[in-house]
Image: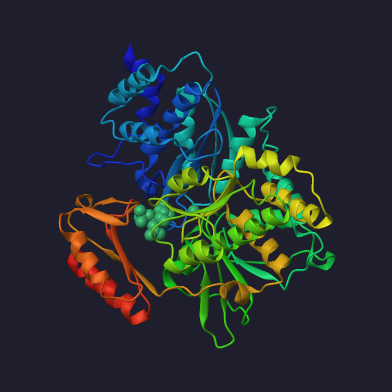
Amino acid sequence: MTSQNPIVLASAKYPKPAERTFQYGTAGFRMKASLLDSVVYRVGLLAALRSRKLNGQRIGVMITASHNPPEDNGVKLVDPMGEMLEGSWETYATTLANAPSDQALLEIYDKLTSDLNIKTENKARVVFARDTRASGPRLVSALLAALEASGTEYTDYKLLTTPQLHYITRCLNTKSTPYEYGEPTEQGYYQKIAAAFKAATGTRKFNGPVTVDCANGVGGPKLRELIKYLSSASEGGLEIKVVNDNVVEPERLNHQCGADFVKTNQRPPPSSHAAPSARCASLDGDADRLMYYFNDSDSSFHLLDGDRIATLAALFIGDLARNAGLGEKIKVGVVQTAYANGASTSYITQDLRLPVVCTPTGVKHLHHAATRFDVGVYFEANGHGTVVFSDLALKRIGKYEPQSPAQASALDTLRALTALINQTVGDALSDLLLVEVILAHKAWGPKEWHLTYTDLPNRLGRIEVADRNIFKTTDAERKLESPPGVQAQIDALVGKYKNGRSFVRASGTEEAVRVYAEAATRGEADDLAAKVADVVK
Ligand code: NG1
Ligand code: ZN
């Protein structure tokens, strides 16, 4: 009898809230944690299907809402190589999440099984972890119910950063293959990163400590753990001062701290008392975003965001490849979104002479575009990004015989970077050490880094509209094709401002439309943003 089906029986304990429509977006499912039990249960079923479809490869499930407030939570799937879930499966996630009843859920599950030719006799294997939110354990029980009901083998990695789960997923699926990525454990992650950091730093010295604000999230305890694997400051290693690492009081998560706070408010967390020119960094709630910043001697605040991390990495890796004698064999490219500051794009194309590709918002788009370069550097302005090396580039870097001591030294550093950088996904801990290596090599402080180019003043606004879905874009979200006529009005406005640029798009994560504008001066950027907003309202 169907009603005895374990999927139906367990689903009855996690009823879908009526009148709610869920959508798997750029960040998976994310909302108030109280609404998520049925969603997590159903995501568990999808993870089982995905693993069976891929012949029992491990699929990751991460329970987190990143930089959102403490009462929110979310869930997303990780594909076998540690990448984001393949696009076509996002639709299946949405369909399962919206099944109106337990019975309808089973019917969709069975239909997906047959439509996708999933062999039911295949093993299903899932690994999962969560951030420090209070709702995490409850949502884990919903996930477990789905894994049990679908006959899935699973491992609970408990508390991890999102990028750690991506790392472990890839390690598990590549174990004993030529593409082995590392030990599939949290310790393995620290060991790999720490050894690579040491090798990449060589004999260079760090210019004082870096203070890291951990958003009172899972990044705090994990950074403290990582530090145990690094050389101490007294041994010539990097001094990392950990702040905002209170995970005992969950309501402090992302509150007045963290990468999103710093980026949105353009100021340090109020708890920060950093000295002038001291290096400061902020992680977000699941440690996949990173922001650097410093106060100048005149107390002016300077943000070194994802664009700055991307340009720094591209500059350094491009130079290393050339100095190693691989300049012709390894082409470095950068991927950005329309939110990247125009000055960063000019710096990359004109000063670094590297190609730039622009993609729609959402790291999966950037990641995908980055894999088309030998070495693809990608970051969203909000600090989420990484560097990916193609198999060919890794082979060339691994096999090349240096022709001089200078080439050998550059090659050693480049090899170390391929292990230091988490190539599965943006990883704030790995990116932090990458930035520190580069600054140490260049003997730069944040000021010198900031001097590489001058940002164009810009403004990002959020407008609530009746229906954001009428705003349809083209050209990597830089132009509106609907509503008709709006783009022509924006173009006419932009034309009136020196270095003017503006675009409008519907948010993928909020019921709102975003307006971005930049121009030669602060006044003009604000004015342009306000005028474009008037067109949209
Ligand atoms: P939306 O809401 O689609 O603009 C935001 C961020 C993205 C990305 C996603 C996922 C901006 C302007 N947008 O997307 O960069 O990080 O959230 O978290 O920062
Ligand atoms: Zn995050």
Q: Residue furthest left?
A: 484
Q: Is residue 185 visible?
A: no
Q: Is residue 408 visible?
A: yes
Residue 315, x across and y down, in percent: 61, 61
Q: Nearer the viewer, residue 135 or 498?
A: 498
Report whether 464 appears left or right of 397.
Answer: left
Q: Residue furthest top?
A: 1
Residue 512, x across and y down, in percent: 27, 58
Residue 412, x across and y down, in percent: 77, 51
Report whether 475 appears left or right of 191.
Answer: left
Q: Nearer the viewer, residue 205 or 133?
A: 205
* Residue 406 picture quarter: bottom right
Going 84% across and 64% down the picture, which residue do you hit? 235
Going 39% across and 19% down the picture, which residue do you hit? 113
**Image quarter in which the N terminus is found:** top left
Q: Residue furthest bottom?
A: 298
* Residue 405 picture quarter: bottom right
Q: Relative to 383, say whether 175 is above or below.
A: above
Q: Nearer the viewer, residue 523 or 125?
A: 523
Residue 350, x across and y down, in percent: 51, 65
Ligand 1 occupies quarter: bottom left
